[in-house]
Image: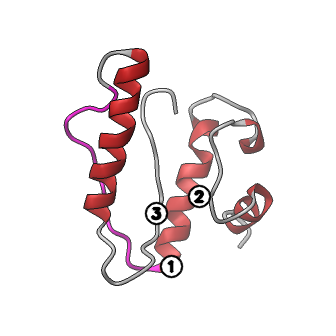
Amino acid sequence: MPDHLHLLIEAQSESSDCKRFIARAKQYSGYYYSKHHGGILWQRYGYEHVLRDDEVTLVVARYIVKNPLRAGLVERVEDYSFVGSLVYTLSDLLEAVAESR
């Protein structure tokens, strides 16, 4: 999205710390953005929510993947440059969030 970011992250261990991850990611990206583009990248406050159920995770993934469609940025999810996963291929991701499941 042009003015905000959706991330769906999954803990890899019991000791994973989502808030720490987000703080470091914002610090790192904000520093490099400021260095290369000037200005501030992130607003002071954001929204994060911990999901506990796989089914809920799929609902959130659908929402995130379809957001560019709802915003009118693209006609097909596949056409949005910033949709993707570091774990799944785009076709696997789209299959997983298909409404028919």
Measured in 3D between alpha carbons, the distance from the residue under mark 3 to the one under mark 2, in whole angstroms, is 14 Å
Taking the image as shown, residue 24 lies to the left or right of residue 13, namely: left
Q: Amino acid at mark 3?
A: Ile
Task: State which quarter of the image contains the C terminus.
Answer: bottom right
For residue 25, above or below residue 35: below
User: x and y percent of residue 74 in the render?
Assistant: 70, 31
* SS at circle 3: loop
Rendered image quadrant of residue 36: top left
Disc 3 to disc 2: CB gap under 8 Å: no
Residue of label 2? 62
Q: Amino acid at mark 2?
A: Arg
Instruction: Name which of mark 3 and mark 2 comes first in the sequence.
Output: 3
Viewer-side label of 3, 2:
3
Measured in 3D between alpha carbons, the distance from the residue under mark 1 to the one under mark 2, in whole angstroms, is 13 Å
Dominant secondary structure of the magenta stretch?
A: loop
Q: Amino acid at mark 1?
A: Asp
Viewer-side label of 1, 3:
3
Residue of label 3? 9
For residue 101, above or below residue 72: below
Residue that extends furthest to the left in the rendered view of this protein? 44
Measured in 3D between alpha carbons, the distance from the residue under mark 1 to the one under mark 3, in whole angstroms, is 13 Å
Decide: few, some or many residues near mark 3? Use Cα within 10 Å; few <14, some 14-19, many ≥20.
few
Disc 1 to disc 2: CB gap under 8 Å: no
* SS at circle 1: helix
Span of residues in magenta: 41-53
Residue of label 1? 54
* SS at circle 2: helix
